Image (cartoon, rainbow, N blue to C red):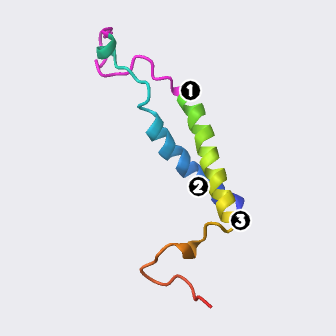
Amino acid sequence: MGVTTYIAIYFIVWWVVIFAVLPFGVRSQHEDGVVEDGTEPGAPQRPLLLRKALVTTVVAAVIVLLFAWLVETERLRLDMFPMPFQLYDVK
């Protein structure tokens, strides 16, 4: 696979990981007992978005690097997965 393919895979993995990481450690204003006027009580008190973005970047990089290593060393191939139809001729 080419570098462009791995960049696209990284982009997809990054977004999946960020949505998995976002709820970690979040406390709402209601839970902390400090609700500011004009805000939703369920809004996060301190979302820590920069920290979560950095963690997501590292985790996504590790996942994609592991995937790239598996693909490039041929430990993971397309023909390992069952297909309901034939994608190519097997010789």
Q: Which mark lies nearer to you, 1 or 3?
A: 3
Residue 78 spot, x, y in % from top left: 57, 72
Q: CA distance from mark 2 to mark 3?
A: 18 Å
Residue type highlighted by circle 3: Thr
Give the image quarter of residue 47. top left
- Pick whichever of labels 2 and 3 is earlier in the sequence: 2
The residue tagged with tag 3: helix, strand or loop?
loop
Give the crowd class for mark 2: few <14, some 14-19, many >=20 residues within 10 Å.
Answer: some
Who's the residue at 61% across and 39% down the image? Answer: 57
Cβ–Cβ below 8 Å for labels 1 and 3?
no
Q: Which mark is residue 73?
A: 3
Residue that badge 2 annotates: 9
Residue 3 spot, x, y in % from top left: 71, 58
The residue tagged with tag 1: helix, strand or loop?
helix
Who's the residue at 61% across and 66% down the image? Answer: 76
Residue 88 spot, x, y in % from top left: 56, 85
Give the image quarter of residue 69. bottom right
Cβ–Cβ below 8 Å for labels 2 and 3?
no
- Pick whichever of labels 1 and 3 is earlier in the sequence: 1
Which quarter of the image is occupied by the N terminus?
A: bottom right
Q: Point out the residue furthest to the bottom here.
A: 91
Q: Which residues are magenta?
A: 33-49
Residue 55: within the magenta? Answer: no
Q: Which mark is residue 50?
A: 1
Give the crowd class for mark 1: few <14, some 14-19, many >=20 residues within 10 Å.
Answer: few
The residue tagged with tag 2: helix, strand or loop?
helix
49, above or below 80, in the image: above
Residue type highlighted by circle 2: Ile
Question: Is residue 54 rendered to the left or right of residue 36?
Answer: right
Who's the residue at 62% across and 91% down the image? Answer: 91
